[in-house]
Amino acid sequence: MVSVVLLMAGRGTRMGYERNKILLPFGDKYLFEFPLNTFLSLGYEVICVISKEDSDIIIPRLPAKNVKYVYGGATRQESVYLGLKKATGDYVLIHDAARMWVSEDLIHKIIEQGKEMTPVLTYTEVKDTIKVVENGKLKTLDRKSLIAAATPQAASLTLLKEVYEAAVKDNFTSTDDMSLIEKYHPEIEINLVKADEEIFKVTTPKDYEIAKEIWRKKL
């Protein structure tokens, strides 16, 4: 069985919206319902990690079957950990709900790459030239060797719980899930799955406009 930890508790202040960006409207639906319904259509268990401030809108719209919810923590990492505690599947996908256009095709590729319970990182190619400043000196990185981490990120429930519990014990904070596996189990190979450009995160008003344009084309 596959479980999905769907992260929905962020505030999204860069959007300039009066509520959580996952409550942005798309016709008679909210943003969060698109990734939620995609995962449910595949028969997966979905644990929605939500904010108490949004519960009045979100909870009444959650389907009764295959959906659980839990209130998120102070950080993304804490929210993921709380979601993992509710998961019952052997293999878990962790996904930011703001990446609303996650496709069934991408999910199938992740499951195929993770069929031996192998961790999987979804990524996109880096288009910009990336530079780093070290000791006051500018250095250009080789773009061909760089990728941008996206979600879903996946691994076995056992492994994810282990590394998240280790991070809590060590007071170690990371901004994505595979980083914890890299830290605590560097010997484990992480498979990569390339996503298309629709996996972008809706973060700014411009992103919202792009997302609405994609939505109109899918109607």
Image (cartoon, helix red, strand yellow):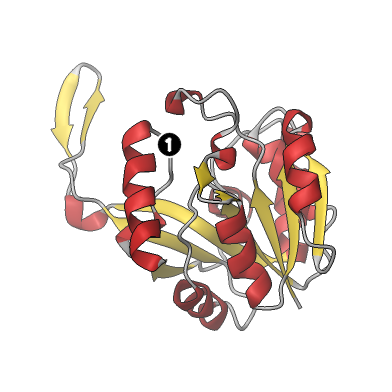
Name the amino acid type tagged 1: Thr
Relative side of 93 to 113, left or right: right
Tell me, yes or no, if residue 165 can be seen here: no
**Which of the two residues, 49 or 126, is positioned nearer the viewer here?**
49
Which residue does the image show at 61% across and 55% down from the upper left?
33
Residue lying at the far top of the rendered structure? 136
Task: Return the x and y of residue 138 as percentages of the image width and height.
Answer: 15, 26
Task: Return the x and y of residue 61 as percentages of the image width and height.
Answer: 74, 52
**Which of the two residues, 108 or 170, is positioned nearer the viewer here?**
108
Quarter holding residue 65: bottom right
* Label 1 SS: loop
Relative side of 124 to 68, left or right: left
Task: Return the x and y of residue 79 as percentages of the image width and height.
Answer: 72, 40
Relative side of 207 to 99, left or right: left
Quarter holding residue 15: top left
Which residue does the image show at 46% across and 72% down from the upper left?
106
Which quadrant of the rendered structure holds the C terminus?
A: bottom left
Which residue does the image show at 71% across and 57% down from the upper left?
160
Please determine whether, in this image, residue 202 is positioned above or below residue 101.
Answer: above
Quarter holding residue 68: bottom right
Please determine whether, in this image, residue 39 is positioned above or below residue 17.
Answer: below
Which quadrant of the rendered structure holds the N terminus?
A: bottom right
**Which of the two residues, 105 or 111, is positioned nearer the viewer here?**
105
* Disc 1: CA contacts within 10 A as few (<14), some (14-19) or many (>=20): some
Tell me, yes or no, if residue 14 can be seen here: yes
Looking at the rendered structure, the number of numbered marks drawn on it comes to 1
Please determine whether, in this image, residue 3 is positioned above or below residue 34.
Answer: below
Task: Return the x and y of residue 215 as percentages of the image width and height.
Answer: 40, 58
Residue at label 1? Answer: 203
